[in-house]
Amino acid sequence: MSKPLKQIHLAAHFPGVNNTTVWSDPAAGSHIEFSSFAHFARTAERAKFDFLFLAEGLRLREQGGEIYDLDVVGRPDTFTVLAALAAVTDRLGLTGTINSTFNEPYEVARQFASLDHLSGGRAAWNVVTSWDAFTGENFRRGGFLPQDERYARAKEFLATAHELFDSWRGDEILADRATGTFLRDAEAGAFAHRGRQFDIHGRFNVPRSPQGRPVIFQAGDSEEGREFAASSADAIFSRYATLKEGQAFYTDVKERLARYGRRPGQLLILPAATFVLGDTDEEAAELAGEVRRQQVSGATAIKHLEFVWNRDLSAYDPEGPLPDVDPVVGEEHISRGRAQVRMYRDPIAIAREWRELAAAHNWSIRDLVINTGNRQTFVGSPATVARTIDDFVQADASDGFILVPHITPGGLDPFADKVVPLLQEQGVFRTDYEGTTLRDHLGLDHPDAGTTAERAVS
Amino acid sequence: MSPTSAPSLHLAVALDGTGWHPASWREPVARPRDLFTAGYWADLVAEAERGLLDFVTIEDGLGPQSSRFLEPDDRTDQVRGRLDAVLIASRIAPLTRHIGLVPTVVSTHTEPFHISKAIATLDYVSTGRAGLRVEITARPDEAAHFGRRTVPLTDAHAGPSARELVTELFDEAADYVEVVRRLWDSWEDDAEIRDAATGRFVDRDKLHYIDFEGRHFSVKGPSITPRPPQGQPLVTALAQDTVPHRLVARQADIGYVTAHDIEQARAIVAGIHAEQAEAGRADQTLHLFGDLLVFLDDDQAEATARRERLDALAGEPYTGDARIFAGTSVQLADLLEELREAGLSGFRLRPAVAAHDLPRITGHLVPELQRRGLFRRAYEAGTLRGLLGLARPASRYSAANA
């Protein structure tokens, strides 16, 4: 008999602060009003998605010393939006990105445990790290963290949070009126963590939540990031959405699990993916081209080139040829607060390659950025997209996808209406939720309670 | 729009667990096992909204509740544990339409940047009904939960070292609120322009660095969250003593005072208003609410008996900082009418037993106040500022203010 079909996991990423989010389209709505989040979440739940995902940024991006104004700017607070979304959904998982650098374990553990209680077991935490002094300027501690310590802090942060989650076993609250015993155990919530990053002790004041611990996501892709995920995460938010890269990443990360005594099913790999749907493949391809042009205006193309050139290129015509001056190489970057800065490690080589590409195709600056930038992951008719997704998952290039539409808040609706039913017909996606918690949806175990708590107080 | 006639008295209710009496969870009507569910809080806030109350506050803390003032205890006969108040408020917001939601935030160990965007977001989620109640903590055990500062154990009520510590924590709280408020203003209202012609989503000239430098922290800004619907959500604080009075005078829109009689109330109100003028805020509305813990029943003997029964269950009489009232709704209405003569704008009532005394407030006290023409018969405004008769302020950074 052939191998049973893998079940696909799907999640929805609220479109955020980057140039893939098209705000100029007449269908684009607010990125701040709660009604947008509510619509998006209800669509994801109607489609039986595993969860909704929110990214985070803690300082407005800058380029050339000025606030970057060409993309969506501004977003609400992650925890607060997720708690409100728990009121307008019943089953959808609620995943929030929370930085381990500019927060403290006691507070974050309280917030996630509270969110898990208030959502009936649907909370998940995408643990990210940061080190930059730029973002640190908004916080008490400032940008104090050396870059090579960011995973040390993140690992210890997460371990400490787990100790806090586990400091209640789950059976302490008796609330026995007759005997007047509210707590079985006066020591409920006791913890003591002594480490290099945190030296804290006392009593955690949120009782054990429905999932015990929130589901843990990890998004880093470095060697350290992969190892961190293999040791501690329930799911990885990866960026590999091509088959070959996806398979290589999938194999690499799943193989690391054994080192930590974990099974392959205990860590899900979920790349971010975009999509453009049309009635036919041809129509979708044409539409995708239009979306790309909306995403990359002339001004955006110039700014994008500045990431690589690391200098002011505002004098150049986006419809003209690439600059003949070379990129500035150095530590000071023209753009701050955005990941792209770190993605172009050898700017001189990239500039040479791009000039050659532009010359060969007779591309303007804008053409070049449109043609070399991120392409939509899935473009085609609903049947094509459903088949492509299924093939990808069955070929072990991922366990599913976190879908990022380019329009807020209605961008997910066509996928929910047209692609999901096809996946359900193929028997690779649920037609209804089987459980109530996010751990249920993702097929993850509920964590053992108790052992860490006993360690912590002994 | 013509201004509606404001009711002459404002009412809020302070929610804390199963109620403010430590034995409240043992009452048959209490739902102690539901305290950690959304449904419990949704039901309480819905009841308060049925009573047309201005707002609810939700207590919080960064350690377990304790019968001792500055230390944890080992008691197992009282409610211990609670959920994050901001998240409770946010979870309830989509389920309510009119009532204000005012969670507690602790300034001593949290980040003003995070809290500013959280309360701004609560304001978006509730479409203009958010506030916060700022408090400090001088508990050494709570400092140890964070590990980034130590707080010496002091005698809370006396001694120069205690006074110095508390003064420092309240000064920090005043800076904290200043940062939170500047961040709310750091986006002008019309900063989002979506100018397709130039490709600009925002007008960056309408986003402002706040550049706050203080003794305890510095914050650059601007906020990542656009200016909230109310512009400035309401800042509230409890003021039981002269040090917190200064915080209220300098930074709050609403202060809760725990006067025990009308003379004391008069003195506190005068003192806070004098400090308000000294802080250069005499032109701004500062509401002072009287804080009272209430046992409400059909007759006074019944209320007194309930209080005694709960005290007996707790093993000691409950006192607390606020005046405790035990009696009928008519008697309470008389008392509120008398106390408001001291210059109080309204009252924040602490139900001794949430499931008993809150429905008494909404079902008995409110109709009594309405009968006397002292309380609204319908919600007359869509925002919390509107309910309290406060205008929506312009951003301090807007060109019109420059």
Image (cartoon, grey):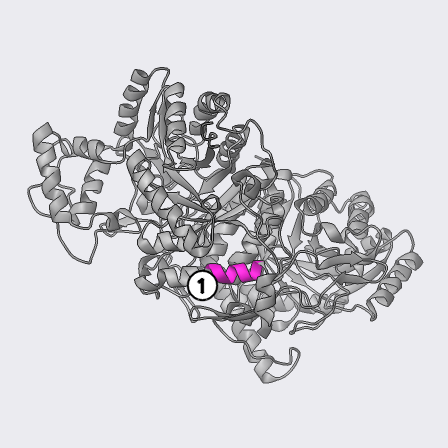
Q: Identify the image quadrant of residue B334.
A: bottom right
Q: Position of residue B48 (x, y in %)?
A: 72, 45
Query: In the visual, does B88 lie left or right of B358?
Result: left
Asked where in the image residue A296 lies, by quadrant, the reply is top left
Q: Is residue B15 left or right of A348 when viewed as pictured?
A: right
Residue B129: horizontal and vertical position, in percent?
Answer: 58, 45
Label 1 marks a residue whose chain is A
In front: A455, or B27?
Answer: A455
Pick the residue in front: B174 or A24. Answer: A24
Q: Give the residue type that dot 1 points to.
A: Glu
SS for dot 1: helix
- Horizontal and vertical percent for residue A320? 11, 32
Q: Viewer-proximal residue, A140 or B322?
A: A140
Number of other residues with Cα within 10 Å of mark 1, as a class: few under 14, some 14 to 19, many 20 or more? some
The secondary structure that most of the magenta stretch takes on is helix
The residue depicted at 77 percent of the width and 63 percent of the height is: B22
The mark tally for this picture is: 1
Q: Is the C terminus of chain A in the top left, top right, bottom left or bottom right quadrant?
A: bottom right
Q: Is residue B388 visible?
A: no
Q: Position of residue B135 (x, y in %)?
A: 59, 64
Residue A213 visible in the shown view: yes
Point 60% across, 64% down: residue = A453
Q: Give the residue at mark 1.
A: A156
Question: Residue B302's image quarter?
Answer: bottom right
Q: In the image, which residues are magenta?
A: A158-165
In magenta stretch: residue A419: no
Q: In the rendered image of this protein, does residue B274 appear above or below residue A86?
A: below
- Front residue of B383/A304: it is A304
